[in-house]
Each structure stands twice: as C-alpha cells, then as structure tokens.
Image (cartoon, rainbow, N blue to C red):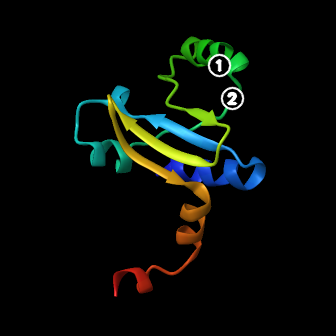
Amino acid sequence: MAAFEMALGGWRARGLGLQVPISALGATAPEARLYSEAPGFLYEVSKERLTDLLALLARHEVDATMIGRTLAEPRFRVLDGGRTLIDADLNELAALHAAPLRPLVE
C-alpha cells in the first residue's frame, strides 16, 4: 500500500503520521480498496496548494482526489466511513516493517 510507504517516509523525515479515509475509493471490500493494483500516483502537497494541484490535473483531464492528511503525531490511521480499520503507532510499524516476518508467523 503506497500510503503506508508515504507514512513511513513522513515519520522518518519529520515524525509525522498519516490518516487515510478510504470510503471515497468505492464500495468494494476494504481489502480491495487498500491493496488493489490500480495504476496511479500519490502526491503530497500542503493544504494551501491542494486546490491549485487539483485544478492543474483537471485541466489535463486527470482524475484526482485528496485521499488523506498528515497528522502531527506518529500514527497511521485508515478510516472507512465511521469505522477505524487501522490506528497504529508508526514507531512500532516501522520496526515490524524492517524486521523479518518469519518470527511473527512461526
């Protein structure tokens, strides 16, 4: 999931977190919305530049939408409507991401 990689990058660089609401990404199962392989890009822009970026992409007929926001605390959150699917500490997630998975599944 590209958003998770961005969350790790923001956490490593500045201690920031990421909150991503996925309800606007369709009505399929949350797993499909989180892990689909649809081509696309993620851009990180300040709130002040968001309108300009969306307008630029619209002029070039590129579908674009805001999918999340940064958090001041090092959390990774995924929301689906009124439900919180993931709310985890990025310090812990980074350690799990960097470590081999074998000890966790044996």
Residue at the location (68% across, 21% down)? 47
Q: Is residue 98 above or below residue 4?
A: below
Secondary structure of the residue carrying numbered label 2 = loop
For this orientation, the residue located farthest to the left is: 28
Q: Is residue 52 above or below residue 66?
A: above
Residue at the location (72% across, 56% down)? 12
Task: From the viewer's perspective, tell me whether residue 63 is left or right of residue 24.
Answer: right
**Which residue has dot 2 on it?**
45
| Residue type of the residue flagged with mark 2 | Val
**Which residue has dot 1 on it?**
50
Task: From the viewer's perspective, tell me whether residue 21 is left or right of residue 54.
Answer: left
Nearer to me, 103 or 28: 103
In the rendered image, which quarter contains the C terminus? bottom left
Nearer to me, 1 or 55: 1
Secondary structure of the residue carrying numbered label 1 = helix
Nearer to me, 79 or 60: 79
Q: Are marks 2 and 1 in contact (CB under 8 Å)?
A: yes
- Label placed on residue 69: none
| Residue type of the residue flagged with mark 1 | Leu
In this view of the protein, can residue 37 be seen by the observer?
A: no
Residue 23 position within the rendered picture, expressed as x and y whole percent measured from the top left: 34, 29
Residue 28 position within the rendered picture, expressed as x and y whole percent measured from the top left: 22, 37
